[in-house]
């Protein structure tokens, strides 16, 4: 099972970016999917998660600005980030709880850098 994240980059404050993360491999099912972020010297923090049925959960710092969604047919999770702030600068990691031949495990993508300039 592999998670491939994409969509990071440099954007000015107030701008938007859309992250994508595709899950591939011999997958039976995908449960929760999510996005986390980390800055140097800090612990990785939750940004948003979405259950297989579509219910979403957000960190207070991104509520109203970020939207998480998923396409179950494509095994892909998205994070639409609007009204970006400089404090959103971080490496963003996607996460998925996947059931495969090996059982149910927690998988992480490689991280994609989002830089918001003032």
Image (spheres, rainbow, N blue to C red):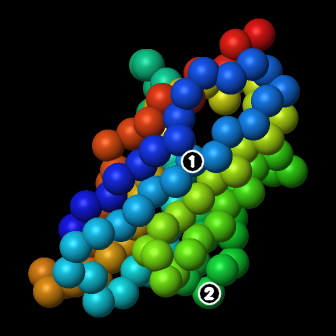
Q: Residue furthest top?
A: 118
Eyeballing the image, is 99 above or below 7? below
* Residue 44 seen in this snapshot: no
* Residue 30 seen in this snapshot: yes
Residue annotated with mark 1:
19
Residue annotated with mark 2:
53
Q: Quick one: 110 or 62, which is closer to the camera? A: 110
Q: Quick one: 7 or 93, which is closer to the camera? A: 7
Alpha carbons under labels 2 and 1: distance apart: 20 Å
Tell me the element at label 1: strand
Eyeballing the image, is 34 above or below 59? below
Q: Residue drawn at (79%, 21%), measured in percent from left and top?
A: 13
The earlier-in-sequence mark between 2 and 1 is 1
Tell me the element at label 2: loop
Q: On the rendered structure, is 27 left or right of 21?
A: left
Number of labels in the image equals 2
Q: Residue furthest left?
A: 102
Q: On the rendered structure, is 100 left or right of 82?
A: left
Q: On the rendered structure, is 90 left or right of 31?
A: right
Quadrant (top left/top right/bottom left/bottom right) for the C terminus: top right
Q: Residue drawn at (45%, 57%), measured in percent from left and top?
A: 21
Quadrant (top left/top right/bottom left/bottom right) for the N terminus: bottom left
Percent x, y of residue 80 = 70, 51
Q: Residues within 10 Å of mark 2 (few under 14, many from 20)?
A: few
Percent x, y of residue 15 = 79, 30
Q: Residue drawn at (75%, 36%), measured in percent from left and top?
A: 16
């Amino acid at each position: 099972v592999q998670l491939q994240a994409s969509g990071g980059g440099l954007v000015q404050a107030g701008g938007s970016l859309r992250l994508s993360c595709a899950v591939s491999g011999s997958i039976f099912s995908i449960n929760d999917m999510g996005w986390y972020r980390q800055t140097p010297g800090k612990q990785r923090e939750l940004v948003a998660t979405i259950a297989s049925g579509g219910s979403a959960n957000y960190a207070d710092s991104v509520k109203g600005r970020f939207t998480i969604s998923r396409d179950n047919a494509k095994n892909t999770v998205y994070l639409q980030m609007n009204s970006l702030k400089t404090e959103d600068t971080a490496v963003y990691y996607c996460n998925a709880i996947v059931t495969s031949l090996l059982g149910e495990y927690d998988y992480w993508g490689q991280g994609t850098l989002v830089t918001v300039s003032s």
